[in-house]
Amino acid sequence: MYYYYAFNIFLLACINMIAVLGVSIFTGFTGLFSLGHAAFVGIGAYAAGALTYHWYVPFPLALLAGMLASGIASLTIGIPTLRAKLRSDYFAIAILGFGEALRVCLENLSITNGARGLSLDELSGPVWVVGVLIVSLVFARSLLKSRFGAMFVAIREDPVAAEMAGINLFRTRLLSLTVSAVMCGASGALLAHRLAFIQPVMFTMTQSTQLLASVIAGGMGSISGPVIVSFIFTALPEMLRKLEMYRLPAYGLMLVVIMIFRPQGLMGYREISDLLRGARDFLPGRRK
């Protein structure tokens, strides 16, 4: 029984990692803060959940539909806000408002069953969860190693200089937002069919803050760091469940400690592969 519970926590952590990857691409590499990415997770969850609940659509198609719905939603909020060249803090407030408006809509629509939520079948098994995570990791790494990733980083470091160098700020930021939203949509679809239940209160600013905290604590210029911290943030509260009221303060304390001793984040601008490559240089026979 314990191993089954631990395995479920592991799968939930993997699902959360997919959403954190999306936020990392948008916030960590492009430099725009978001307090509303939980909205894209919720859109993916409800789009996929409604299709399997009301129309018995096969799960693979529902998963793709959830990703597509989140991508379209990102265009809806991204085009007017990014075209207006809102600064990072103003954009964060705008997308926060979008997330809260979406939550109210979900609580009052009949197709979502309102605040009572939807009871679904448990369709996202370990193969789906781990498979989508691996694909997301490979895709994110490939994207950030491409010229688009270089443009993301250039905008993060200095938007004015990036624009003078010929980078279209609006299109590049919109691409980053859309990719991150699609990943969050995949995470939401998997979450809905893993927990077999969803309701609007699951997709609030609290979840958005947790996603953002994972990116900041893991490292704004890293993929590995946010993924590792996301896993810890998901598993730690469950590991400390016996401590009852003290487990959430322990969660916050860990975040404070990371920010004090590693203000650049757990991994900073490095990846696990960089650490492994550095460790190999110290092995016997590798030094000149």
Image (spheres, rainbow, N blue to C red):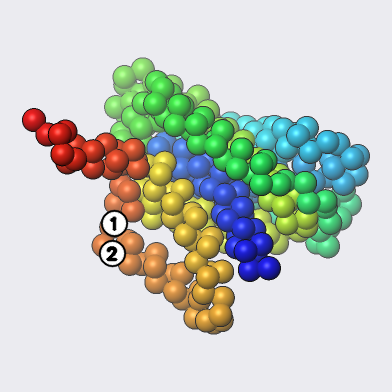
* Quadrant of the image containing the C terminus: top left
In the rendered image, residue 30, in percent from the top left (x then y), is placed at 42, 36
Q: Is residue 200 placed above or below 242 in the rendered structure?
A: above
Q: Is residue 128 placed above or below 167 in the rendered structure?
A: below
In the rendered image, residue 282, in percent from the top left (x then y), is placed at 17, 41
Mark drawn on residue 263: 1
Would residue 131 be seen by someone viewing this image from the given angle?
A: yes
Left or right: 93 in relation to 127? left
Q: Residue at x 36, y 48 (%)?
A: 219
In the rendered image, residue 64, in percent from the top left (x then y), is placed at 72, 33
Most distant residue in the top direction: 166
Element at label 2? helix
Number of dots carrying numbers: 2
Left or right: 265 in relation to 130? left
Camera-side residue of 107 and 239: 239
Mark drawn on residue 260: 2
Alpha-carbon span between mark 2 and mark 1: 6 Å
- Do the residues bearing badges 2 and 1 touch, measured as CB atoms within 8 Å? yes
Q: Residue at x 33, y 26 (%)?
A: 162
Most distant residue in the right direction: 55
Element at label 1? loop
Q: Is residue 181 placed above or below 115 in the rendered structure?
A: above
Q: Residue at x 56, y 33 (%)?
A: 135
Q: Residue at x 89, y 40 (%)?
A: 56
Under mark 1, the amino acid is: Pro
